[in-house]
Each structure stands twice: as structure tokens, then as C-alpha cells.
Image: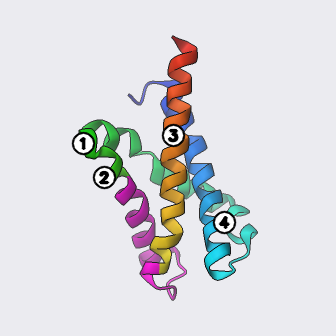
């Protein structure tokens, strides 16, 4: 699975889209400047890193894989934000709301890219 170009393209584009979605949701809910999140290359890098397990989670958990991957993409960035990255003063439930946008974007883009690559390469 990790040997396919489409998987890595899906992870990369999904992580970037997820970071932009997080910025959008944070801006809508709390007025966080869009560029504070989407304009930060480190946040894009971590958004991509957090998306790397998605193919494994989708493949390993069958029909529940999408739920497991969604929970991973919401909870792990929230825990990392509270424990290390910050903002540590933002309530975890608020961060979870931000990361719900991230999770939906990552999963949607990952699935679209991998399906598109399968169709075009076959």
C-alpha cells in the first residue's frame, strides 16, 4: 500500500487540504487568522505527518476503518496540540472541533486522489 504513488499523493494533498480546512474552521469558530494556520509551513508538515497512518487504518479495520481514521485525525492532533505544540490554553473540545474539519478534508482528498489514480493508471 505505501509503495503506490497514489497513496503518497493522497497523503500529501490530504494533509495540505486538512491544514487549510483547520484554518478555515478555526477562523469561522474563533476568529483565528486564516494565515496563522494555513500560512505556517510547519503546520502543513505536521498535517501531512498525521495523515501518514490513514492508508493503514483504512485497510486494517475494514468497514470501521473510516471511523478509526477519523478518530485518529481528530484526537492525535488535539493531543499533540495540548501536550506539545499549543495553543495549550484552548479547550480540547475546541481543538477537536478544529480537527474535525482537518479529518474530513484529509479523508475526502485521500479517497478522491487514490480513486482517481486507480482509474487513470489502470
Residue identifier under label 4: 24
Q: Earlier in the sequence, mark 3 or mark 1?
A: 1
The mark found on residue 61 in the picture is: 1
Q: Earlier in the sequence, mark 2 or mark 3?
A: 2
Q: Secondary structure at mark 2?
A: helix
- How far is the residue under mark 3 from the one under mark 4? 19 Å
Question: Residue drawn 56% across and 33% down?
Answer: 113
Q: Earlier in the sequence, mark 1 or mark 2?
A: 1
Indicate the position of residue 68 as horizontal and vertical percent values. 31, 52
Q: Secondary structure at mark 3?
A: helix
Q: Quadrant of residue 33?
A: bottom right
Q: Residue furthest top?
A: 122
The mark found on residue 52 in the picture is: none
Q: Secondary structure at mark 1?
A: loop
Q: Tell me whether circle 2 and circle 4 mark residues in contact (CB < 8 Å).
A: no
- How far is the residue under mark 4 from the one under mark 1? 30 Å
Q: Earlier in the sequence, mark 3 or mark 4?
A: 4
Amino acid at each position: 500500500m505505501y509503495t503506490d504513488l497514489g497513496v503518497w499523493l493522497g497523503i500529501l494533498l490530504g494533509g495540505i487540504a486538512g491544514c487549510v480546512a483547520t484554518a478555515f474552521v478555526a477562523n469561522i469558530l474563533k476568529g483565528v487568522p486564516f494565515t496563522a494556520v494555513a500560512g505556517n509551513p510547519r503546520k502543513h508538515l505536521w498535517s501531512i505527518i498525521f495523515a501518514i497512518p490513514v492508508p493503514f487504518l483504512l485497510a486494517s479495520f475494514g468497514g470501521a476503518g473510516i471511523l478509526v481514521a477519523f478518530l485518529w485525525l481528530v484526537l492525535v492532533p488535539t493531543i499533540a496540540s495540548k501536550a506539545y505544540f499549543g495553543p495549550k490554553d484552548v479547550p480540547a473540545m475546541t481543538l477537536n472541533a478544529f480537527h474535525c474539519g482537518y479529518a474530513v478534508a484529509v479523508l475526502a482528498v485521500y479517497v478522491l486522489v487514490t480513486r482517481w489514480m486507480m482509474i487513470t493508471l489502470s
